[in-house]
Image (tube, helix red, strand yellow):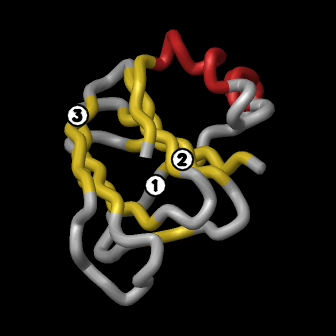
Amino acid sequence: MISDSLDKLSSYEPLVPGIARLEGLLPTYLEEMEDYECDRTMCTLLIPTERATVACGWREDPLSHDVVAALSVDKGSFVLFLPGERYICRSEGRVRLVKLE
């Protein structure tokens, strides 16, 4: 789980090619989450419109509900989950969801 300011998003281009070109993508919004989700092949980028709390779980144990790390992020920030990282999000507003290869 990586979190930073949106204005620094392009600095993550070496880690996730294409991450700096998000403006051209149609927005998809995260539905309210009841349990952890995970994408094993793609990176998941969450961009909250208001304050959000995000957490990641054990990568090694997909059935565990334990929280490994949690963050509160504000508007103007993003959270990036690499392939295989389990995540859950609660937000006061909408959360833009982008999947990147």
Identify the residue position indicated by label 3 in the image: 51
**On the rendered structure, is 34 left or right of 40?**
left
Please determine whether, in this image, residue 4 is positioned above or below residue 60.
above
Write down the residue under mark 1.
30
Q: Is residue 96 visible?
A: no
Q: Secondary structure at mark 3?
A: loop
Toward which corner of the image does residue 76 lie, by quadrant? top left
Q: Is residue 20 above or below residue 48?
A: above
Please rate how many residues cluster around mark 3, counting C-alpha atoms within 10 Å: few if below 14, some from 14 to 19, many from 20: some
Q: Which amino acid is tagged 2?
A: Leu
Closer to the chain start, of discs 2 and 3, is 3
Q: Which of these two is toward me, 54 or 69? A: 69
Category of crowding for the residue at label 2, using alpha-carbon neighbours closer than 10 angstroms: few (below 14), some (14–19), many (at least 20): some
Residue corresponding to mark 2: 97
11 lies above or below 28: above
Secondary structure under the numbered disc 2 in the rendered image: strand
Instruction: Give the percent coordinates (x, y) of residue 55.
Output: 29, 55
Whether residue 4 is situated above or below residue 15 in the rendered picture: above
